[in-house]
Amino acid sequence: MSKKTSRDAQPRQANPPSPERPEDERLPLGKLATFGLQHVLTMYGGLIAVPLIVGGAAGLSADRTAVLVTASLFIGGLATVLQSVGLPFLGSKLPLVQGVSFASVATMVAILAGPGNDLSTVAGSIVAASILGFVVAPFFARIIRFFPPVVTGVVITAIGLTLVPVAADWAMGGDSESDDYGSLANIGLAFLTLVIILLLSKVGSATLSRLSILLGLVGGTLVGALLGLTDFSEVGSGSPVAAPEFLAFGVPEFDIASIISMTIVILVIKTETAADIIAVGEIIGTSVDRRRIANGLRADMLSSAAAPLFGSFTQSAFAQNVGLVALTGVKSRFVVASSGVIMIVLGLLPIFGQVISAIPMPVLGGAGVVLFGTVTGSGIRNLRSVSYDGNMNLIIVSTSLAFAMIPVVKEDFYHHFPEWFQTIFHSGISSAAIMAVLLNLLFNELTAGNSRNPSVFAAKPVRVLSPSDLRDLREGDVFVDGRFVDCDGEEVPLVPDDKLEEVRAKIECGEITDTSQIPEVVAPDGDDPSDAGPDGGGTGRTDETGAAQEPPRPRREPQVHGTAERQD
């Protein structure tokens, strides 16, 4: 056999990816379709939730809400193809699935609550804010520093918390004027849907777990049908295939206050998308530079600007699909592009939107508890990476989240303020974002004037231990190399018995605010505090010859990685 024949006999992969660009791998058509469908199913629950929420807030009928659902599928598919395949200066060319962003939901609901506002006002705010976001995309690297994890974590947490009342309203029936609003049947159906989702997440396979939201909706709807709570009379009506309507909800109206509120959300969305671009680049092992981030953000903003013209809303990368890339190890951007094509096809079939719109509200409420709770959990997970030692980040987080909840728990709080102010701050997300950005600037960027001593709200209580009385040990304390360390890794000084009451009194009256001040108090008069014992707390002792003597140690010493046992 000739060399040429031998080489031809070997299987070859068309267009194999270069080691520098694994995202360019091309898979057979069957695998493209299979993996692409998996991406669609992973994000389907989150994708349909936004148009359902906004449709309910706008008071739309089931058939008009179905238009929002199909439009969101169609535009999300186009945005996904643009982001993954790309055009000159548009698209990161990475495996990123695009869809309607959760970040804008509360702000859109707040805009709709304004006097005289409707979906055309929402559309105008999204178009204007997205165009601004498109313009600043190349310069966003200079702006993103004002959105560190302490800010984005607060905003994502606020998104989930402000949506919890929506899930509760759905669980009660969605229509406060209905006779069965809040009935046991409605709330029971919502709870059953929640239980189905949780059980599938626990006992199911990896595939069932990823599809738990969708399967929970199906199971809850079937039970709802048995209870007579579903209405599928509109399913199948109209044309079997239809493109999204252009300006289906009117010409966009541009309200300054709504645009300002939405611009804040757009900046948050850009921050999330930039983080997803960087994350997926690290996951698949490809280079991501500023130009690639800018191209991805431009595609994001162009899709967001066009979406309201066809009945959809702001677009962003779906983080759960980034996780799916890491889970499956399938790095090809063409797989994600195929998921975009599937979404486009679904968006051309009105029956899918009609079926989703016929799902009973209590079923959506049960799924919403998980969906919105997951968003909150994602924000809390982001906040875990924030350092709270020696800074005011705890104040930033707590104050911003409190501002996020004010319009949620007290809707009329801002009713005596100007309308433009109400539009901006009636959204818990906008309130949280504004406060987080301003407080981050005040405490972390403009550091001039910051006190060296931590605020009473942020400072940890000073703790000391007496060597003869160790009843103050707490869970997580460990004894390492002759020193006590608490669960945060900070040393707890040992204080001599004759100085214990004096030290505690000074702590209570505020004279001691930091453990570094304790050696000055416990050191004998005329002695240098630096000559204190090995614990740094002035507990060094000498024997009769003047030789240094170790401070007394507890009777039992926990292991380094264990928790301290109570000593009696």
Image (tube, rainbow, N blue to C red):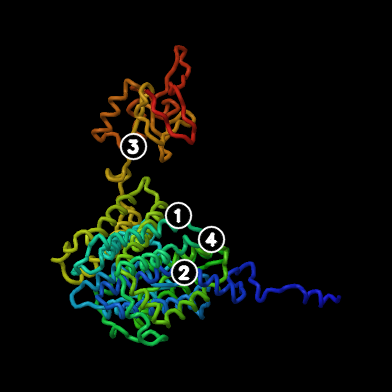
Residue type at tag 1:
Lys
Q: Which of marks 2 and 3 is nearer the N terminus?
A: 2
How much space separates mark 2 and mark 1, taking CA atoms? Answer: 18 Å
Camera-near label (4 vs 3) is 4
Residue in the foreground of this view, choosing between 560 and 500: 560
For the residue marked with disc 2, what is the amino acid? Leu
Q: Which is more foreground, mark 3 or mark 1?
A: 1
Rounded to the nearest angstrom, the CA distance separating label 4 from label 1 is 17 Å
Query: 10 Å neighbourhood of mark 2: few (<14), some, or many (≥20)?
Result: some
Q: How far apart are marks 2 and 3 (CA)?
A: 53 Å
Residue at image position (52%, 70%) is 95
| Contact, mark 4 vs mark 3 (Cβ under 8 Å) | no
The kind of secondary structure element at disc 4 is: helix
Q: Which of marks 3 and 1 is nearer the N terminus?
A: 1
Provide the residue designation for mark 1: 202
The one nearer the camera, 222 or 521, is: 222
Question: Foreground residue, 152 or 491?
Answer: 152
User: In the picture, residue 529 is in which quadrant?
Assistant: top left
Q: In which quarter of the image is the C terminus?
A: top left
- Tell me which numbered mark, 2 or 1, is placed earlier along the sequence: 2
Q: Where is residue 213 in the image (x, y as percent from the top left)?
A: 41, 64
Relative height, residue 66 to residue 506 (above, below): below
- The first of marks 4 and 1 along the sequence is 1
Task: Say if 516 sits above or below 105 in the image.
Answer: above
- Circle 3 residue: 514
Report the residue marked by disc 4.
327
Q: What element carries label 3?
A: loop
Type of the residue with mark 4:
Leu
Mark 4 neighbour class, 10 Å CA radius: few under 14, some 14 to 19, many 20 or more: few
Identify the element where label 1 is drawn. helix
